[in-house]
Image (cartoon, rainbow, N blue to C red):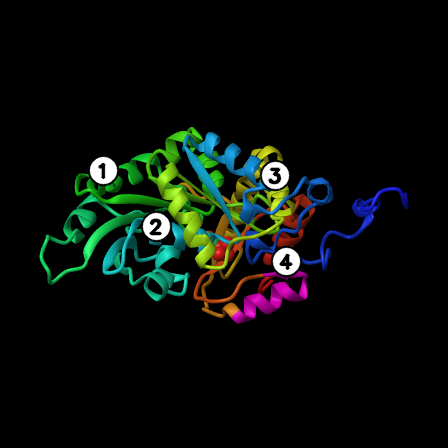
Amino acid sequence: MDSSSPYAGLAARPMTGDADVVDLRSDTVTRPCAEMRAAMAEAAVGDDVYGEDPTVAALETALAARLGKAAAALFPTGTQSNLAALLAQCGRGAEFLVGDRYHTYVYEAGGAAVFGGVVPCALPCAEDGSVSAARVEAAVKPDDPHYPVTRLLALENTVWGRALPLSALEAPAEAARAHGLRVHLDGARFFNATTALGVAETALAGVADTVSVCLSKGLGAPIGSVLVGDAETIGAARRLRKALGGGMRQAGVAAAAGLFALERTVARLSEDHARAETLRAAIDGVDGLRAPAHPGMTNMAFVTPEDGDCDGLRAHMAERGVRLGGGGPTIRLVLHRDVDDAGLDRAIEAFRRYRA
Ligand SMILES: *Cc1c(COP(=O)(O)O)cnc(C)c1O
């Protein structure tokens, strides 16, 4: 090992805790690769709470420009980025409209209500995860002291792995705007959506006033999400970020991973989508398992054991070194940077042996 460099030899270290396991639980399990770690080690840093971290500034500027927005702020997590967006655009006693399957409604511990006195109003999603303009129209409250003040519509794309076409977002967004509502897009897997749809990144971001993008999912960064929007809203979100405990210091170490991801790993997301479809098609032919195709599916597949024995399927796969996520009656399978063709083949082989 070359002792002249503090990070010499990094590439030789194992990048995965258990390189032998094919982990299909989530794309959040991706570990930063050696090149990403080198970029992190080399990052110029400063105190970002003082606005002095050049790498954080570079990431924020790059993503804002790329998505056609005026400003951006780096957050430790997507949950905090979504929360700051909701709080920045809704006051206490306001409500936001949100699909009943969306992360901001189901999986963020009710943060907007807990920390901001903002009430969610859940709209039933269609089968593809979209919310209709008619549902939005019907949910906006009249100006009457009985009601909370409806301030924002929260959308999501991809939704459960499915990329919704622009039209499916534009219609509810237009209905919301017609009533003076703001529109937020939870784009945790924003680039999976643009990759699958083949639409311009500015076009998808243009649907909403604010967009939250995760760096720590399929893009492979270890940490971080970025909120983009107009300067005033992002300014308010920065203040909220401090209040929420998300003001980070030498965050350039994390931002360098995000910049690396934007430059180097967005372009390979289509590989994950192709592997997800290969896996799905292979599973759907296996006796006792169903894995139907869903239009617009990106890096995920969903498998249902016909006998309902999800634990049995998980145990069968685990014995063969393939880790599946929890829950039932359908199990989500997620493809990502740390599953290559060899890992895919192992997973397919293991599924084929189910009940065989
Ligand atoms: C993962 C995810 C988030 C944010 O997740 P964090 O774990 O807080 O970074 C938000 N929305 C969706 C749809 C997600 O999948």
Mark 3 residue type: Thr
**Could you tell me how many numbered marks the image carries?**
4
> Please, is residue 289 above or below residue 282 in the view?
below
- Near mark 4 (Cα within 10 A), the count class, few <14, some 14-19 or many ≥20, is some
Mark 1 residue type: Glu
Q: Earlier in the sequence, mark 2 or mark 4?
A: 2
Q: Earlier in the sequence, mark 2 or mark 1?
A: 2
Q: Quadrant of the C terminus?
A: bottom right
Query: Label 4 near label 2: C-beta < 8 Å?
Result: no
Left or right for 329, reference 38? left
For disc 3, the marked residue is 55
Mark 2 residue type: Ala
- Near mark 1 (Cα within 10 A), the count class, few <14, some 14-19 or many ≥20, is some
Label 2 and label 3: CA atoms lie apart by 25 Å
Can residue 217 be seen in this snapshot? no
Residue 3 picture quarter: top right
Q: Earlier in the sequence, mark 3 or mark 4?
A: 3
Residue 321 lies in the magenta-colored region: yes
For disc 1, the marked residue is 174
